[in-house]
Image (tube, helix red, strand yellow):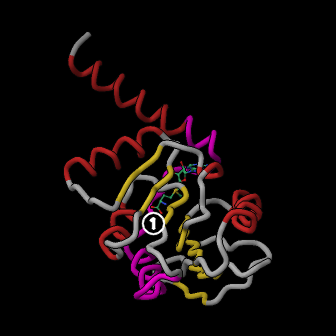
């Protein structure tokens, strides 16, 4: 096989893996745009809730860009990115080798199985269908007072503390919630 054919076969395999995991999770690894990321960061408080340095959890961390930004902004909080899609997960792990960040970790695990009981902040950019089981999961697993920050899709039946639209071409909404239920 020539070098060109090998490169094409490799590229197709990588694309195939990304498509496979997008179909399996129902969500392609589309990264949050810089404009929406800035809007999200601006909504977050300087200090996160809770007496201890609770974890920051990104549900579906994609290529890792948001998780890196959170880890730099909140160096005293452990940041965990959960990602099932193997290529974005591998890229974020590789990035961590090149740019070590002591409080950041990426796990190739289904976020529905994540332990959220010590979390101060959960952040996500998913699909509308995923928000329904996720709302239920957060109601059961997240401590009261924890914050939830959602890009574009709202949590059904949760009342947002704040909602702003990013200055991008879609006016993407960003929602900030506080878990507050018995
Ligand atoms: C739209 S992307 C957002 C990536 C990143 N959060 C960002 O904002 O740049 C959503 C990601 O969630 C991942 N995902 C969806 N369901 C998942 C699950 N149950 N467990 C782990 N990752 C999941 C997908 O693989 C995809 O990479």
Residue 133 image position (x, y, % from top left): 75, 58
Q: Indicate the quadrant where residue 22 lies.
A: top right
Q: Is residue 158 above or below residue 141?
A: below
Across and down, in percent, residue 64 comes to 38, 56
Q: Residue at x 41, y 50 (%)?
A: 106
Q: Which residue is mark 1?
A: 32
Q: Confirm whether the magenta stretch covers residue 3.
A: no
The front one of 34 and 91 is 91
Which is more toward the observer, 85 or 117?
117
Asked whether mark 1 and ligand 1 are closer than 8 Å, the reply comes as yes
Q: Residue at x 45, y 38 (%)?
A: 86
Answer left or right for 107 relative to 20. left
Quadrant for residue 138, please give it: bottom right
Q: Position of residue 43 (x, y in %)?
A: 48, 86
As helix, strand or loop, the secondary structure at mark 1 comes to: loop
Write the residue at 59% across / 77% down. Answer: 146
Along the horizontal axis of the image, is 80 left or right of 95? right
x and y, in percent, of residue 72 in the image: 30, 71
Identify the image quadrant of residue 75. Answer: bottom left
Q: Can you say whether 99 is above or below 169 in the image?
A: above
Above or below residue 130? Residue 39 is below
Q: Residue at x 56, y 72 (%)?
A: 151
Q: Locate residue 141 relative to residue 14 in the image: left or right.
A: right
Range drawn in magenta: 20-49
In the image as oriented, which residue stretches furthest toward the top?
A: 1
Reply yes or no: does residue 44 show up in magenta.
Answer: yes
């Amino acid at each position: 096989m020539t070098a060109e054919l090998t490169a094409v076969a490799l590229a197709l395999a990588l694309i195939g893996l990304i498509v496979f995991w997008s179909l399996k999770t129902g969500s392609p690894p589309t990264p949050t745009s810089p404009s929406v990321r800035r809007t999200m960061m601006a909504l977050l408080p300087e200090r996160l809730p809770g007496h201890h340095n609770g974890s920051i959890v990104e549900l579906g961390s994609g290529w890792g860009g948001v998780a890196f930004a959170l880890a730099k902004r909140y160096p005293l909080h452990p940041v965990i990115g959960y990602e099932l899609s193997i290529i974005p997960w591998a890229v974020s792990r590789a990035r961590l080798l090149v740019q070590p960040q002591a409080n950041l970790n990426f796990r190739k695990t289904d976020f529905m199985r994540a332990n959220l009981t010590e979390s101060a902040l959960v952040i996500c950019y998913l699909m509308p269908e995923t928000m329904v089981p996720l709302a239920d999961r957060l109601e059961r697993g997240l401590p009261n007072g924890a914050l939830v920050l959602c890009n574009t899709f709202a949590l059904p039946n949760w009342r947002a503390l704040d909602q702003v639209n990013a200055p991008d071409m879609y006016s993407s909404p960003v929602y900030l919630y506080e878990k507050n239920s018995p």
